[in-house]
Amino acid sequence: MIDLPGDGADDEEFLDAEFPLGDGTADTEAEVACPWCGEVNEIGLDPGSGAVQEYEEDCQVCCRPWRVVVNYQSDGTAEVSVEPESPE
């Protein structure tokens, strides 16, 4: 069980501050062009992983790696960019 600060009356205010309410929607997919071959890829997004995310993903067509950067805005829309990832 999680202990929340306060005597119960402040719990709702605490939760509202920690988890602000929106309309409940956030982007869960995006279309991006592979920086290597130029083909459009549809990728899944995970809004639960934070407002700013950075990870590596492979192109679904040419299989070369790229770095994905996701920035969620306060309205739930995601700005997604990709750049080539050089193999190590």
Image (spheres, helix red, strand yellow):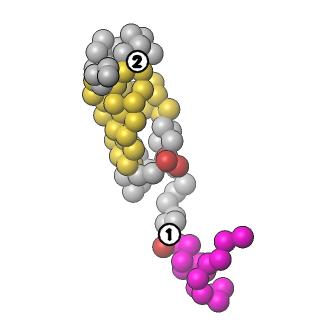
Question: Who's the residue at 42% across and 21% down the image?
Answer: 58
Q: Quadrant of the C terminus?
A: top left
The residue to which callout 1 is attached is 18
Q: Position of residue 62 (x, y in %)?
A: 39, 10
**Above or below, comparing residue 29 to residue 20 in the picture:** above
Q: Three-letter amino acid code at disc 2?
A: Cys
What secondary structure do most residues of the magenta stretch adopt? loop
> In the displayed structure, does residue 69 sit left or right of residue 14?
left
Q: Secondary structure at mark 2?
A: loop
The residue to which callout 2 is attached is 59
Q: Position of residue 23 (x, y in %)?
A: 52, 57
> In the displayed structure, does residue 41 sit left or right of residue 86?
right
- Membership of 50 in magenta stretch: no
Question: Who's the residue at 62% across and 78% down the image?
Answer: 4
Question: Who's the residue at 27% across and 28% down the image?
Answer: 83
Q: Is residue 33 visible?
A: no
Extent of the magenta region? 1-16
- Counting the numbered discs, the total is 2
Question: Who's the residue at 41% across and 52% down the image?
Answer: 51
Q: Quadrant of the N terminus?
A: bottom right
- Membership of 7 in magenta stretch: yes
Res 2 → quadrant: bottom right
Q: Hey, which residue is sitting farthest front in the picture?
A: 88
**Above or below, comparing residue 28 to residue 15 in the picture:** above
Q: Three-letter amino acid code at disc 1?
A: Glu
Count neighbours of disc 1 (C-alpha within 10 A) and say few if under 14, some if 14 to 19, many if 20 or more: few
Q: Position of residue 5 (x, y in %)?
A: 58, 83
Q: Is residue 12 visible?
A: yes
- In space, the residues marked 2 and 1 are separated at their CA atoms by 36 Å
Q: Secondary structure at mark 1?
A: helix
